[in-house]
Amino acid sequence: MIRRTTAAKGLALAAVLSLGLTACASSDDGSGDSTEGGGGSSEPLKIGTILPVTGTLAFLGPPEIAGVGLAIDDINAAGGVLGNDVTVEWGDSGDSTDLSVASSTATDLIGKGVSVAIGAASSAVSLGVVDQFAEASVMQISPANTAADLSGYGEFFARTAPPDTVQGPAHADLIMGDGHCKVGFLVQNEAYGNGLRDYIQEALEAGGCEAVYGGNGEGHEFAPGETNFGAQVTDLLAQKPDAISIVAFEETTAIVNELVSQGWDFNGTTYFVDGNLSNYGEDFDPGTLEGVQGTLPGAQADEAFRDQLTTWYSENESGELEDFSYSAESYDATVLAALAAVKGEATDGATISQNIRAVSGAEGGTEVKTFEEGVKALEAGDEIHYVGKSGIGPLNESNDPTSAFIGIYKYGADNTYTFERQIEGKIEE
C-alpha cells in the first residue's frame, strides 16, 4: 500500500458537443509526436503529487489522492515500471489565495527527484508552477485543470480533464434547456473562474440569451477567498435574473448563505460547476440546495471503481471518501505516465513527455483498459490506446483530451448531489 505523509490530512441535451479549439502555442514544439526510448533514466519511477490538501479546493483532495494512490498500487501489483515499484512523494498545492504553497511543494518535489507531478487541481495554481516543473524536465499532468490558457502550454504539461471549451457550452445548454435566458454570474477573479464564465456566456449569447450581471468586462468578479457577498448579491438580484451560475470554490458556502438571506429560490434556478460541486450536507438547512444542478467534467465512476477508491482511502488515510470528483482522471494520469515510461524504456520526465500521447491512443493501436494490459501490448511491439476510468479520448497536439464526458448532477433535500446523465463533448482541431 502507498501511504501519504503530508502534514495536513483533508455535464438537457442528448447530443455531442463539437467545438473548435485554438491552442496556445509555446516557443517549444509541445506536440510530443515522436516517441523515443532507451536513452533516459533507468531509476525507479518516482511520482509526486501537487494536490489540494489545504485551501478552498481541499474537498477535491481526497478523491484525487485516492485516484493516484490506487493507481500506484495497481501498477506495482502488475510488476511496476521496468521491473521496479513506483514510489510517490505526496505534496499540497494549496490554492490561488497563497501560491507560495504550490511553489514550495514544486521545489520540494523537484529536489526529491520526481519525474512526474500529478496536479494541480486549480488552473491558477498550475499556471504558477508549470514553468518551474518544465525547467526541471518534470512532466506535470493535471487531473482537474480546465482553463483554456493551459492548452498547448508546453511539452511538459498535459491533462486528463477537458478544457472549459467543453464544460462551458454544456453548462449553458443545461441552463437554456431549463428555460432560462437571463443569467447572473458570481465568478471568482482568476484563470479558471473568468475562463469558464466566458465560455458559458459565449454559448448563452449564441443561443439568444444574455448575462444580466457578472459578465465579461463588467468588473463584478470577486477575489479568491472572499467571504462577504452582500453587495454583490444585492446588485445581482436587482437585475432580476431567472438563473444564477456560481463559478467559485469554497466561497460558494458564503454565497449560498447570502442568497438565502436575500430570499433567492434555488430550486431549478441555480447552477454549480466542477469547482463547487460538493456534498454540503449539514452546511445548510435541509432543502436549501434542492433542485440545484451542476456540471462536472468526467465520466461517472462505476460502482466497482468507487468501492476500490473508498477502500484505498480508508486503509491509507483513515477516513471516509465522500466525493469522487476527478478521482478517475487522477488514476488515468498516473497510469498514462507509467505506460509512457514503459514505452520509452526510461523513467525520466522527458521520456514520459515524448511518449504520453502515443500511449493515450494518439497513434491508434491496441485498446487496453489496465496498466497490465498496456505493458503486455507494448512488450509485444504494439502501439496502444489506453482507455481508462475517465472515458477521455486520446491526447491531441495540445496535450488535451480529444473528447470527454460532462456529467449533469442534481441536489436533493439533503444538500448532496446525485448523477443524472452525461453527454460527450469533443474538441475538433
Image: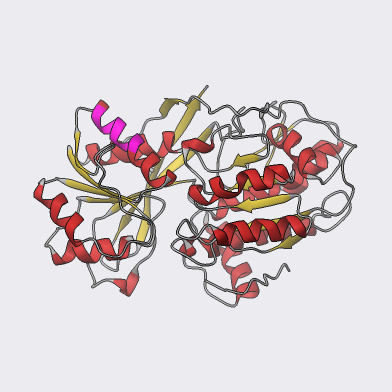
In this picture, residue 362 sits left or right of residue 215: right
Q: Over which residues does the magenta segment extend?
A: 198-205
Instruction: Give residue 87's position: percent from left, percent from top.
Output: 78, 60
Instruction: Give residue 212's position: percent from left, percent from top.
Output: 17, 40
Secondary structure mostly seen in the magenta stretch = helix
State how many labels appear.
Answer: 0
Q: Nearer the viewer, residue 377 or 7?
A: 7
Instruction: Give residue 263's position: percent from left, percent from top.
Output: 11, 62
Q: Can the viewer see residue 25?
A: yes
Residue drawn at (32%, 37%) of the image: 200
Q: In which quarter of the image is residue 290?
A: bottom left
Q: Which of 260 and 428 is in front in this view?
A: 260
Q: In which quarter of the image is residue 130?
A: top right
Q: Is residue 53 above or below residue 177?
A: below
Membership of 319 in magenta stretch: no
Query: Which residue reaches farthest bottom?
Result: 318
Colour scheme of the picture: secondary structure
Which part of the image, by quadrant, shows the N terminus? Answer: bottom right
Instruction: Give residue 335's position: percent from left, percent from top.
Output: 70, 48
Q: In which quarter of the image is residue 410?
A: bottom left
Q: Can the viewer see residue 289?
A: no
Residue drawn at (17%, 37%) of the image: 181
Residue drawn at (66%, 60%) of the image: 70
Residue drawn at (19%, 32%) of the image: 209
Q: In this view, does 427 lie above or below 213?
A: above
Q: Nearer the viewer, residue 342 or 56?
A: 56
